[in-house]
Amino acid sequence: MTIALLGAGVMGSTLLAALVRSGHDPEDLVVSDKAPERAEQVATAHGARMLDPVAAVAEADVVVLAVKPQDMPALMEQVHDHIRPGTLVVSIAAAISTDFLERRLPDGTSVVRVMPNTPALVDQGMSGMSPGRHCTAEQLDVARGLLESVGRVIVLDESHQDAVTAISGSGPAYIFYVVEAMIEAGVLLGLPRDTSTELVVQTLYGAATMIRETGAHPTVLREQVSSPGGTSVAALRALEDHKVRAAFLTAMEAAARRSRELSPPTA
């Protein structure tokens, strides 16, 4: 199975590296980018081949679209006449709907829309995947296998993709923001910065591992830490006084709204 990755940016190169690690023959992986020197650099680093977009899609069984949303219309026009019948097109471009792609690809082309996130860089990504109108169950399994090489995958209706973007797509930014604040608080309280960083990062990792491995609701886990009249309760009271929970809800609503705004018209 030949896989063509159109776009050699962060997510494109991350997926390429993961495919090589998971056992794909680098000779079956083709990389293209509007900056040829970038494509050549990424391809060489992983033993893959570098081709222009037209040549890449002409021999591909699976085409992964990893370009910026604003570059998508021109790319679709460039490759339209060269995509073979039966090709599976997997888009990891933000805000681009399956309908938008289906209208710009040969009739009947199978499309899968995916919203990944940056922890894919360490094989801990979370991807939300939605099949288009022509995608078969077998093709969806192929797409799932590609993204499972960089983390976990859920399949859901495309109407939920803006929410996926707000929760997991943009989610790492919220976590980094909180971690940054906690580290600064440690420094404010007199800790050396490297000590504060180690304390916060391991606490975050441990808490996330507890949620995943225990299966307990976060509320239950939070209550286990919050002794009556203790330090955690005092801190949580301060967070509630500053309406931090409401701020997170508002922030994620804003992200989902912006995702809808960024979606180009399908016509």
Image (spheres, rainbow, N blue to C red):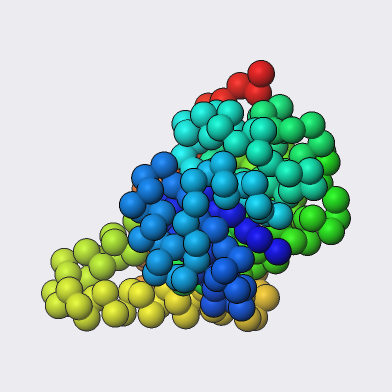
* Quadrant location of the C terminus in the rendered image: top right
Q: How many marks?
A: 0
User: Residue 196 occupies which quadrant of the picture?
Assistant: bottom left
Q: Toward the viewer: 176 or 95?
A: 95
Q: With 157 as the anchor, is 180 left or right in this view?
A: left
Q: Position of residue 218 (x, y in %)?
A: 59, 68
Q: Can residue 181 be seen in this view?
A: yes
Q: Where is residue 103 in the image (x, y as percent from the top left)?
A: 71, 27
Q: Toward the viewer: 238 or 123?
A: 123
Q: Can residue 151 be seen in this view?
A: no
Q: With 120 as the anchor, is 184 left or right in this view?
A: left
Q: Does residue 156 lie above or below 188 as drawn?
A: above
Q: Toward the viewer: 117 or 236?
A: 117
Q: Position of residue 195 (x, y in %)?
A: 22, 81
Q: Does residue 7 lie above or below 237 as drawn?
A: above
Q: Toward the viewer: 37 or 112?
A: 37
